[in-house]
Amino acid sequence: KVLEPGETVHCTIFAELDGQGNPCITRQKALQVATAFDSNNPNRPGSGIYDQVRNAFGSEWNQNPLGGNDGDTKVVLFFFRSATLGSGLFCYTSPIDQSPTPSELSNKAEIVYVNADKDLIQTLSTLAHEFQHLINQNEKIVRQGTFPAGAQDENVSVNEGLSQLAE
């Protein structure tokens, strides 16, 4: 964990460690990301990415139970090194993390995985993009933990278009 719980409002920031036990992002960058996500998006001043994307697209899974799949009301932002998954990958979410079915592949949380090696503007843009995917998964499939029969994923092109808009 890079930042203490009281330093963020809507996110918890974790980072992959290097061989010496150091996180792959600096505390300064983590604070910049947390500030932009929580309250002050420099790309669209007035509020944070969290509220801006939620106001436009809905909510991530945060009910049934309270806090969603992991019981934590904060979205997890997990930073990884380019060497781990490749420099071409900026950010992603994994639908399996939202699955109600126990699986060794699921981290059972509302998580956005973020490449720590990108600059701040790239990081914030793709964070907004992927947060929309996390919200879309809830709005279309998860539905606050109810997983109704017959629920279907959003059309891929529409979902990507919405995420482009979120950026």
Image: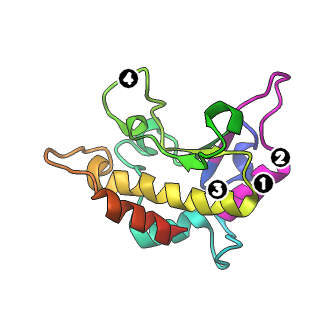
Q: Position of residue 6 (x, y in %)?
A: 72, 49
Label of residue 31 in the image: 1
Report the disc number at residue 103: 4
Mark 1 and mark 4 in contact (Cβ < 8 Å)? no
Q: Residue at x 33, y 50 (%)?
A: 144
Separation of marks 4 and 1 at Cα, in angstroms:
32 Å
The magenta segment is 12-37
Seen in the image, is 96 located left or right of residue 82? Answer: left
User: Label 2 to label 3, Cα distance in Å?
Assistant: 16 Å
Q: Which of the two marks, 3 or 4, is nearer to us in this view? A: 4
What crowding class fits label 4: few (fewer than 14 Cα within 10 Å), some (14-19), or many (20 or more)? Answer: few
Regarding residue 115, the answer to whether it shows in the image is yes
Which quadrant of the structure image shows residue 1? top right
In the image, residue 95 above or below residue 158: above
Between disc 3 and disc 1, whose residue precedes?
3
* Amino acid residing under circle 3: Val
Q: Name the disc covering residue 9, or none.
A: 3
* Amino acid at dot 1: Leu
Q: Amino acid at mark 2?
A: Arg
Disc 2/disc 4 C-alpha distance (Å): 32 Å
The correct choice, above or below, for 132 with respect to 113 in the image is below
Quadrant in which residue 76 is drawn? top right
Which callout, 3 or 4, points at the residue further toward the start of the chain? Answer: 3
Residue drawn 45% across and 33% down? 108
Distance Cα–Cα, label 3 vs label 1 = 12 Å
Secondary structure of residue under mark 4: loop
Instruction: Please say whether residue 81 is visible from this viewpoint.
Output: no
Q: Are marks 2 and 4 in contact (CB under 8 Å)?
A: no
Judged left or right of residue 84, residue 153 is left
